[in-house]
């Protein structure tokens, strides 16, 4: 099994993790898919209170040793007491004693970042979480978050990143590489858009490149992110056969010229990230953040 290091921690994570956003429509099948991924050597799974998939993850990791579990606190739970309470809820739903990586799901300008990070550090001190990360944060927001930490360092930033969505390039990728903060790439297949017929030239190149390596186009697209360095993709996994295909993206490398060729598709096929659409609305209209968290709280209560 090929591993990637999480930030400066020395933790060895499989080169890809499994995401759980939008799972929950067929729990038995999805638990089987996640379990198959773990059996294939993947040791990293990501969830969030907002996803409503923490109990699903609990079932999938039951009886599995050495799993690295990440979850996230919703943005309107960023006040001190709310962070603590949200973490307790996630621990209960996950059925574990500590969360390996606890992340701030989105920035929230209405709550001082210092207050939120005091709570995160308290969770580390109490042994409820091991590492602190963020998600959908810009470089400026990451600097502010790190400055608010007194005894810990950020280990990761989870952002949308794929062949079609290059928002992290170059500012965020350079900053994270310099500071040794891992990028966790969600929607690495651009939520399925990568294989839209409008991108036929890219699809053909992925397939052709895959044939040279004995790999599929999907595996090539995921490996492109792995080859970027300091990036851990977390594709969503809902079917066993899909998960096993994803695991085949690990343990090998595209050639330099293949990477350059794939990079060249940027100007023709770029898409906007979810964060680029959502964050301006959240920053301008706080009720959007509250609405998202209200929905997440309904899902969390349903899980409980």
Image (cartoon, helix red, strand yellow):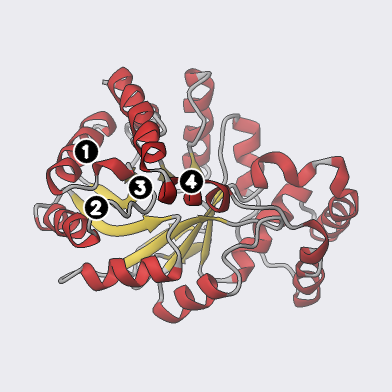
Q: Residue furthest front?
A: 284
- Real-space Cα distance between discs 3 and 1? 14 Å
Of pointers 4 and 2, the one earlier in the residue sequence: 2
Between marks 1 and 2, how big is the CA–CA gap? 16 Å
Which mark, by number, is residue 281?
4
User: Which residue is at the front of the view, 127 or 288?
Assistant: 288
Label 4: element kind: helix
Estimate the spatial distance between the alpha carbons at disc 4 and disc 2, rounded to whole Å: 16 Å
Q: Nearer the viewer, mark 3 or mark 1?
A: 1
Q: Is residue 216 visible?
A: no
At 89% from the left and 52% from the top, the residue drawn is 204
Q: Earlier in the sequence, mark 3 or mark 1?
A: 3
Q: Residue at x 50, y 56 (%)?
A: 159
Q: Nearer the viewer, residue 165 or 292?
A: 292
Q: Is residue 25 positioned above or below 109 on the image?
A: above
Which comes before the other along the chain, label 1 or label 4? 1
Q: Earlier in the sequence, mark 1 or mark 2?
A: 1
For residue 181, side relative to residue 170 (left or right): left
Circles 4 and 2, Cβ within 8 Å, touching? The answer is: no
Q: Nearer the viewer, mark 2 or mark 3?
A: 2
CB contact under 8 Å: marks 3 and 4 = no
The residue to which callout 1 is attached is 86
The CA distance from mark 3 to mark 4 is 26 Å
- Asked if the residue at tag 4 contacts the one at tag 1, i.e. Cβ–Cβ closer than 8 Å, the answer is no
Q: Identify the residue under disc 2.
A: 111
Query: Which residue has dot 3 on it?
Result: 70
Q: Position of residue 106 (x, y in %)?
A: 39, 50
- Few, some or many C-alpha atoms within 10 Å of disc 4 (few <14, some 14-19, many ≥20)? some
For residue 151, side relative to residue 26 (left or right): left
Mark 2 touches mark 3? (CB < 8 Å): no
């Amino acid at each position: 099994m090929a591993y990637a290091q999480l930030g400066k921690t020395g933790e060895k994570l499989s080169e890809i993790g499994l995401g759980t956003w939008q799972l929950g429509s067929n729990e038995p099948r999805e638990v089987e898919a996640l379990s198959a991924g773990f059996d294939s050597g993947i040791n990293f799974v990501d969830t969030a209170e907002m996803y409503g998939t923490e109990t699903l993850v609990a079932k999938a990791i039951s009886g599995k040793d050495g799993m690295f579990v990440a979850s996230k606190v919703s943005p309107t739970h960023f006040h001190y007491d709310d962070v603590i309470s949200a973490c307790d809820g996630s621990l209960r739903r996950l059925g574990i004693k500590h969360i390996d990586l606890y992340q701030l799901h989105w920035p929230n300008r209405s709550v001082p970042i210092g207050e939120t990070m005091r709570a995160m550090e308290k969770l580390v001190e109490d042994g409820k979480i091991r590492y602190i990360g963020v998600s959908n944060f810009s470089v400026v927001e990451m600097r502010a978050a790190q400055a608010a930490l007194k005894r810990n360092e950020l280990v990761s930033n989870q952002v949308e990143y794929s062949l079609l969505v290059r928002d992290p390039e170059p500012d965020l990728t350079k900053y994270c590489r310099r500071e040794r903060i891992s990028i966790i790439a969600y929607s690495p297949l651009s939520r399925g858009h990568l294989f839209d017929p409008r991108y036929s030239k890219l699809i053909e190149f992925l397939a052709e490149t895959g044939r040279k390596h004995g790999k599929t186009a999907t595996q090539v697209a995921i490996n492109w992110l792995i080859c970027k360095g300091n990036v851990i993709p977390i594709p969503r996994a809902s079917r066993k056969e899909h998960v096993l295909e994803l695991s085949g993206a690990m343990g090998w490398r595209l050639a330099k010229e293949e990477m350059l060729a794939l990079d060249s598709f940027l100007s023709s096929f770029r898409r906007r990230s979810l964060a680029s659409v959502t964050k301006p609305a959240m920053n301008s209209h706080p009720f959007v953040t509250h609405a998202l968290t209200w929905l997440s709280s309904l899902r969390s209560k349903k899980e409980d």
